[in-house]
Image (spheres, grey):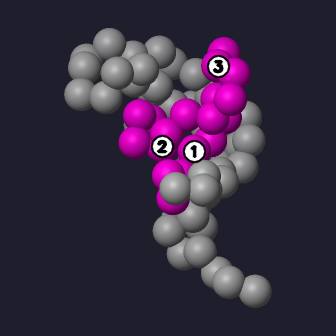
Amino acid sequence: MIIDLELEEVARRFPLDQRVRYFPIAGEIDFVTTAIRSKTWRLGHGAIVIKIVGRSGGVHVGHLEAIA
């Protein structure tokens, strides 16, 4: 079994039900407050994505910021 340490680290940062700010356009100041609704997974080209409330499909974790 191969262990994906980067994927595990992202999963720790964004557990289920974690409240987050989702930035639809990276680098812009506009965001939506939402929550995590799935485990993280890696796409075929290597990007790590996760499902959030209010969006279909996965979003890139680079567009998320955890809310403490």
C-beta proximity under 8 Å, tags 2 and 1: yes
Which image quadrant is residue 3 in? bottom right
> In the image, what residue occupies the spot 50% across and 68% down?
6
| Amino acid marked by disc 2 | Val
- Which quarter of the figure is the N terminus placed in? bottom right
* Residue corresponding to mark 3: 55
Q: Position of residue 37 (x, y in %)?
A: 73, 34
* Whole-number angstrom distance, CA of label 2 to CA of label 1: 6 Å
* Residue corresponding to mark 1: 49
Q: Position of residue 22 (x, y in %)?
A: 46, 25
The single residue placed furthest to the front in the displayed view is 45
C-beta proximity under 8 Å, tags 3 and 2: no
Mark 2 Cα shell of 10 Å, populated few (<14), some (14-19), many (≥20): some
In screen coordinates, is 23 left or right of 36?
Answer: left
C-beta proximity under 8 Å, tags 3 and 1: no
**Residue nearer the viewer, 66 or 3:** 3
Q: Is residue 22 above or below residue 58?
A: above
Q: Is residue 59 magenta?
A: yes
* Camera sees residue 50: yes
* Residue corresponding to mark 2: 61
Q: Is residue 10 above or below residue 66?
A: below
- Mark 3 lies on a secondary structure that is loop
- Mark 1 lies on a secondary structure that is strand
| Amino acid marked by disc 1 | Val
* Camera sees residue 13: no
Mark 3 Cα shell of 10 Å, populated few (<14), some (14-19), many (≥20): few
- Mark 2 lies on a secondary structure that is helix
Stretch of the chain drawn in magenta: 46-64
